[in-house]
Structures are given as C-alpha cells and as structure tokens.
Image (spheres, rainbow, N blue to C red):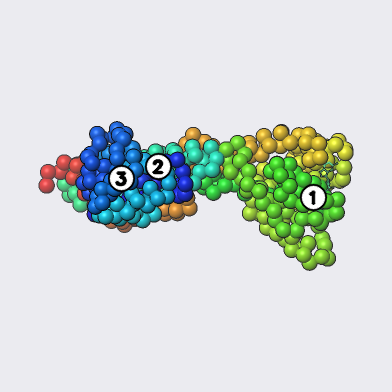
Amino acid sequence: MHTIFALASGAGRAAIAVIRLSGPDTSTILRHLAGGLPKPRLASLRRLRHPDTQETLDEALALWFPGPASYTGEDSAELHLHGGRAVVEGVSAALITLGARPAEPGEFTRRAFLNNRLDLTAAEGIADLIDAETAAQRRQALRQAGGALARRYAGWAERLTRLLAHQEAAIEFAEDGLPNTLEDQVRAGAATLAAEIESHLADGHRGERLREGLWAAIIGAPNAGKSSLLNALAGREAAIVSARAGTTRDVVEVRLDLGGVPVLLADTAGLRETEDEIEAEGVRRARRRAEEADLVIAVFAADAPPDATTLGLLAPGTLVIANKNDLAPAPATIGGIDTLAVSAATGQGLDALRASLAEAAATRAGLSEEASLTRPRHRAALSEAVDWLGEAGRAPLPEISAEALRAALRALGRLTGRIGVEQVLDVVFGDFCIGK
Ligand SMILES: Nc1nc2c(ncn2[C@@H]2O[C@H](COP(=O)(O)OP(=O)(O)OP(=O)(O)O)[C@@H](O)[C@H]2O)c(=O)[nH]1
Ligand SMILES: [K+]
Ligand SMILES: [Mg+2]
C-alpha cells in the first residue's frame, strides 16, 4: 500500500494550503520532513526541510493522526502550509522524494471505505457535502455522510441476513425438529421488510430532487409577464422584457436558492398558435419544459381573460399567478385553483410569491428530518431488493425462497458496499447453536 498525498484545500494562491497524507510511511515521512513526530491530533509548529538539501521549505502546522482512528483508517497527517504555489510545490516534491505519491481523485475516501470507516452511501454523502450549494443540500449531505442511510440499510441487511439464515436452517436442519413454522415466519418477515423498503422508496423522489436541484418552469400566454417575473425573482435582467407578444423564444434559466432548496427556474415562450416557425419551436420547448418540471408556475395577466391553452395545462400542484394586479383586480381563482395576486411592475405580492415557491420547493424536495435516498443507484438497488423479497414470499419451495433472499441481500450489499452472503453462515451458526 502506497503512502499518498494531495492538496486538500483549493488550488491557487491562498493564506493557507493543506496537504494531506495517508499510508503506512506517514510517520517516517513526517520525521524526515518535520524533524520528528508531533503528538497525535495536536497541531504543532514545525520547520519543514527538504530531506536531501535540508533547505527550509516552510514553517507549518503539522498534525499527526495515527491509524486506525483517522479519516482513512490509516496513519495520516496534515500539513497546514503558507498557501503560495512555490511552497506547495516544494513540499510536494519533498514528499515524492520521501516515497509518497500524489493521490487519485477520491482515494482518501476510497481508503476510508476499504478500512470500514464508512459505507458507500456515507462516502457519497461526503462528495455531496463538498458540492452542496444550499443549506438544505448541506443538511441532507451531512446526514448521509454521518451514516444515516448507512445505518438504515445496514439494519435492513441484517434483518434480511437473519431471514435467510432461518430459511437455510429450515431447509438444512428440518429433520432435526426445528419448529416447522419457521418458513411462515420467514414469509411474514420478508413481507414486512418489503413494505418498509417500499415506503422508503415512496418519497416522491425528495432526496434526489434536493441533491440535483428542483426544476421549475414559468408558463403562460404571451405578454402575461413571465419574463418580468423571472427577472424580479432572480434580481437581475436575465430575460428580455418587451411589450411585443412573442418576445421570449429560447428557454431562459436562472438558479435560485428558495429557502435552502436549489431551484433551476425556467422562463419560456408565451403559449399560442403561431405561423412563425422560430416562435413555434419556442412554444414546443415551453410545453416540454412544463412536462419535465417538478413545479409549474402558470402566469395569467389580471387585465385579460385566462387563455384556454394555459388553462389546459393546469394540474394539481400548479402555482397559479395573476400578474399585473396593478392594472386590474386579480380573480380569486383561475381554473379552480387559488391565485396569487402579484405585480411584477410594482413588486406587490412578490414576497408572498417567494414564500409560496419556497414552500412548494420544500414539499417537493423533502426537507424532512428522515434520511432520504439521494441517487438513482439507491432507488435501483432498493427496488430490486423489494422485487426479490416478493419473490421470496411467493416461492413454492424453501430452496427457491432462500435463493431470492440471497439475491435481495446482494442488492442491498451493492448499495452499501458491505454485507456479503458469507455472513449468513455466522448467523446460521450463531443464532441456532445447533451443535453440529
Ligand atoms: N402594468 C404592468 N405591466 C407589466 C407587468 N408585468 C409585465 N408587464 C409588462 O407586460 C409586457 C410583457 O412583459 P413580459 O415580461 O415580456 O411578458 P412575457 O410573458 O414574458 O411575454 P412573452 O415572452 O412575449 O411571452 C411588458 O411591457 C412588461 O413591462 C405588471 O405587473 N404590471
Ligand atoms: K413580451
Ligand atoms: Mg417573455
């Protein structure tokens, strides 16, 4: 196993640069570079010298984290250097001279996984934490990095292992007079577990939406004031506004932070029949956006009757806006949905609109205290486990049922990167004390 190092802080000039080291030679390297091993987990000021030339490279803080109680589980260290490029390059060159090699992307966390410091879902949580742009994303990533999904999935895998062990026992040791209700218990246990996993799956894709950001689309008739509203919400002139109907053609996107939920808000072409082929393509794109969106915002002008095309696209959950409330009183409902009266021109009602959007974003993207799955990979593995559990419940023979339970366990194992089928043996022999 190589000792690896990497610049853990961002590239470029900075006050401080952090170089991280991990691997079996860490202590030797630290002794050579920093003239001795600091006390574990205590920052100490050290003069770093090149091992061959003895040239001073920097005065730095050195931290020594002996394994296994380190991030990677290996002997590790951190060097907090002055953040200049030449300092970082000089220390990196010295580390290579001392036998370390630059780390591959993700290699520290990979080693942490291999050393059982975290499971795959927690590792993904750490990646998400680094990418988190909003507070809600940060909370979700922190939960996952802290092992919230890992614990839940490990709990399920453990129950599944037990079911499989019991099923195996029913097959192998039937003649030894174990209770013959065992098979029924396994069936019942499989059904309960499948139901639990299904309810975890039926989350409206909360966690995935929060991780990726919610898609919202503004639709409505030409000149309803869609682009004006987008600009008002974004706080900048992202889209062209004009009195001419049919101004917007391309989809114009802005990123918003709505109460901690990242939202990609799209302005679209006004919906109408048109001979202009460019505008017609814009209308097609608008419709497609509305179909793909997690949240549709339909805009009507209060001073005009609601147009049939936009009315036809209203659905439960659509946010209905009556804009231009400065020109005419807004109707209380449009198409049976309560309206939000606003004026993009005067700014009236925009705070209420922001609050409604944040609330809609929060319900669609979770913000629940429960740990939600966050990746299609999670969904695929869990769905597969549910299918195999169903199979196990229906199987006419205990041997076939055991095979299905084993497949369900493999699906969960892929999810966490843990639980091998071999562990079933431990449970079989641990749980039953059969004495054979
Ligand atoms: N009085 C008033 N005028 C508004 C309001 N909102 C928008 N307008 C005006 O309405 C016209 C159309 O606004 P846009 O934002 O371009 O409307 P749009 O829905 O994006 O139009 P298309 O892109 O052509 O579909 C412009 O002249 C705006 O200044 C409002 O709340 N009050
Ligand atoms: K317009
Ligand atoms: Mg527009």
Q: Which mark is residue 56?
A: 3
Q: Nearer the viewer, mark 2 or mark 3?
A: 3
Tag of residue 202: none
Residue shown at 24% from the left, 34% from the top? 39
Q: Are marks 3 and 1 in contact (CB under 8 Å)?
A: no
Type of amino acid at the residue the image marks with label 2: His
Which amino acid is tagged 1? Val
Q: Residue at x 83, y 37 (%)?
A: 325
Specify which label sits upstream in the sequence, 3 or 1: 3
Kindly identify which residue carries mark 2: 82
Residue 243 at x, y percent in the picture: 86, 50
Badge 3 element? strand
What is the spatial separation of the Cα atoms under label 1 and label 2, in whole angstroms? 49 Å
Residue picked out by circle 1: 241
Task: Give percent across and percent down for residue 390.
Answer: 40, 51
Residue 386 or residue 171, whichever sits in front: 386
**Residue at disc 2, secondary structure:** strand
**Residue 192 visible (yes or no):** no
- The number of numbered badges drawn on the structure is 3
Quadrant where the N terminus sits is bottom left
Secondary element type, mark 1: loop
> 268 and 241: which one is in front?
241
